[in-house]
Amino acid sequence: MSGPAGWLTILDGIELAVAPGEAVAVLGPSGAGKSTLLGLLAGLDAPTSGDVRMFGSWLGALGEDGRAALRAGRVGFVFQSFQLVPGLTALENVMLPLELAGRERVRETALGALARVGLGERVGHLPGQLSGGEQQRVALARAFAPDPDLLFADEPTGNLDGRTGSEVIEQLFALRAERGTTLVLVTHDEAVAGRCDRRLRMVDGTLEPGA
């Protein structure tokens, strides 16, 4: 990234391979580059050098539309800020990625996903009518409804209180275990990271094995 003083290196010398079905946690302080790494791995951002391969395809060889098509129905996201569409109900938010992926039985699948996270009675509510914990559970339902091969989670409990965050994490790992989903999780929480198969620590833009 270029700034007033020239080039600023955010990530440097990153080499990372994640096996199918593996859960990998990325720990580190704020500003270490964890979210930047997640954005690059997901193809949401493009690196200035190097490349990322997802499902056998090099992301650098694909345009934005090509990367979106590659992710459709196969990659889920859970963000700290929920990222729900404010004008859509809980049900419509969960239906959205299913529709974009061209799935069948969209409404039925979305209703089942919301019931799985305990929101079967809240399907007609808008995000603004839901608590933070409920919004994050809608985000979980949305992420897992297409039965993705790969899930990226960026500080999924960062905006939640301790008890609510613990409930969301329990649901995240339960859904992941049911589906065998590959998980890349950015977190500050050592206990949450300890539930993953592998822990990595980001220090000054580089990755080190976690303790």
Image (tube, rainbow, N blue to C red):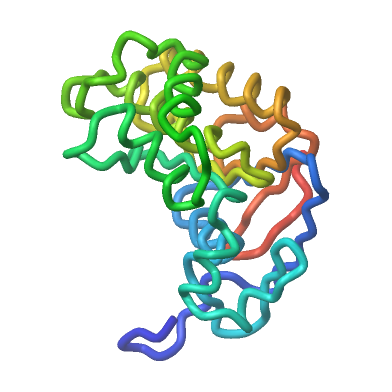
| Residue depicted at x 58% and y 63% | 204
In the displayed structure, would residue 116 be above or below residue 109? Answer: above
- Dividing the picture into quadrants, the one containing residue 27 is top right
Which residue sits at x=63%, y=83%? 61
Which is nearer the eye, 5 or 194? 194
- Counting from the top left corner in percent of width and height, residue 180 is at 75, 33
Q: Is residue 24 above or below residue 37?
A: above
Q: Is residue 140 above or below residue 30?
A: above
Q: Position of residue 198 (x, y in %)?
A: 78, 40
x then y, percent, for residue 150: 65, 46
The residue lying toward the viewer, choosing from 207 and 117, is 117
Q: How many marks?
A: 0
Position of the N terminus, as image quadrant, is: bottom left
Report the quarter where the C terminus lies: top right
Q: Quadrant of residue 197?
A: top right
Above-or-below relation of 75 to 146: below
Q: Nearer the viewer, residue 7 or 44?
A: 44
Name the residue furthest right.
19
For image coordinates 72% across by 24% down, the residue present is 177
In percent of width and height, residue 127 lies at 23, 29
Q: Nearer the viewer, residue 23 or 181?
A: 181
Q: Residue at 26%, 18% (x, y): give it.
A: 131
Q: Is residue 19 left or right of residue 148?
A: right
From this viewpoint, which residue is outermost toward the bottom?
6
Q: Is residue 194 left or right of residue 36?
A: right
